[in-house]
Image (cartoon, rainbow, N blue to C red):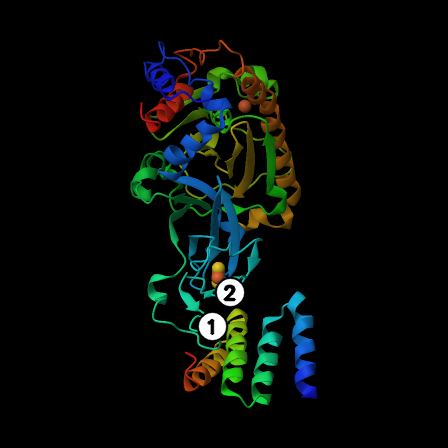
Amino acid sequence: MQQLHHIDAELHRLHDTPDPQQHSQIHERAARLLPDPAEQRFHLTHAWVYALVHGEPTNIDRLETTLRQLDAL
Amino acid sequence: MLDHDTLARDLVAVRQPVGQAHGLPSSLYTTPEALALERQHIFHNGWACIGFAKDVAEQGDAHPIDFLGAPLLMVRDKSDNVTVFENVCRHRGMILVEQPRKFGGVIRCPYHSWCYSLDGRLRATPHVGGPGINVHEAVDPTTTGLTPVRSAVWMDMVFVNISGTAAPFDDWLAPLTDMWADFAGKPVYHGGADSSFTLRLNCNWKLAVENYCESYHLPWVHPGLNAYSRLEDHYHIEHSGAFSGQGTRVYDPKLSEAQSFPNFDGLPAKWDTSAEYVSLFPNVMLGIHRDHFFVIRLEPVSCEQTIEHVEIYYTSPEATGPDYADLRTLNAATWKSIFVEDIAVVEGMQRGRHAPHFDGGVFSAVMDSPTHLFHDWIASRLGA
Ligand code: FES
Ligand SMILES: [Fe+2]
């Protein structure tokens, strides 16, 4: 719970200075801390979008595979 | 107010032989409706220049452009192609890119984060099927990419045909590329920040073209040129329906005693002393010389305001380096002072267009034929 609060605060802070790579990593961390698949899909979607913005193919592939496994893609 | 019946009659008078013709009517210089008409018939239905490939110099660079109110986006993709799209998201129509910038990955719409690759493909539609569900049968990515705009690059200029109905670009340009076949396949290199400037004119864009077409004004408006380039050293350049301008037979730049720019390789002897200045209709004015090339791109801002974007190019990477920096600065300053001399006359003609009884004027059949050729082209494009 503590960790999730921390992640929320970080996302707020990042909103104004978007570093897509950092954005992507934080959402991926949030997804790992959440037990509910719906919440995981939500955060992994954001992790994926920011990975696309950053343009790093390995991360994009990995996230797309996970999203497909969760029926999110 | 633009009265269409009167306009149609006036345009017929423009299309007479130069000795009997009148110039374009003043309503085409002073009414906002005229620019709307030109936007459709001249700028959107044909080819027009919107910018320069050097403005997207590296892969991933994107440059938004407002082209007479049409939001466009010039992009250099990962295969080094310069392409133009409508700068608008296919979802709810949000403007995609507000400032020139570089993209490492996709272009993300700032509204609901739909993402497009640099070649225009729709790459992601987050939450389109509900939270965390990123696909939906109603949105087909293969038909929902960025809307491409027909475009082509020549001598670093980026041209578009918004309507998609103009002749193929190469056919449209052929009269000029034929005339300048000596320069075919010779790349040009932009001089950098010192070779780029803009001028704001309080006049209709057509007056800038008209003034550029002719050499008649040179001895009066540019007396500094008289010393080495007399009126009789100039010749008309006329290609009906495409371009007009003037050439000189005594090009001999003396910017510096110590240094001169390198010439294009392999030019015929004609270019030792010739230079040519051509208005390629509608909105670029070009100057070609054995040692440099410049473009003035006209951006109509309103019916009475125009921005000239001036870009100077050289013949080799060497000429764009530090050894030639002072000479480039001098060359840019020299051209700028000449273009600034023209401002008073084009702005004066703009104010003249408000005279209630001015009928578009008459032409010298000898000296003004390149200008008449431009007026005739405008009249034909507006349907006369
Ligand atoms: S308008 Fe672009 S994603 Fe909605
Ligand atoms: Fe001039």
**Left or right: B305 with respect to B271?**
right
Place of residue A55 in the rendered image (x, y in percent of width and height, measured from the top left): 51, 71
- Compare residues B124 and B225 and report the one nearer the observer: B124
**Some atom of ligand 1 lies within 8 Å of the CB belonging to the residue at label 2:** yes
Dot label at residue B36 = none
Q: Are marks 1 and 2 in contact (CB under 8 Å)?
A: yes
Place of residue B176 in the rendered image (x, y in percent of width and height, measured from the top left): 36, 35
Q: CA distance from mark 1 to mark 2?
A: 9 Å
Q: Is residue B278 above or below residue B119?
A: above
Snapshot quadrant of residue A3:
bottom right
Q: Amino acid at mark 2?
A: His
Q: Circle 1 sits on which residue?
A: B127
Q: Secondary structure at mark 1?
A: loop
Callouts 1 and 2 on one subunit: yes
Dot label at residue B112 = 2
Q: Is residue A1 above or below residue A27?
A: below
**Left or right: B382 with respect to B111?**
left
Q: Secondary structure at mark 2?
A: loop
Q: Amino acid at mark 1?
A: His
Task: Tell me if I can see residue B79 in this picture.
Answer: yes
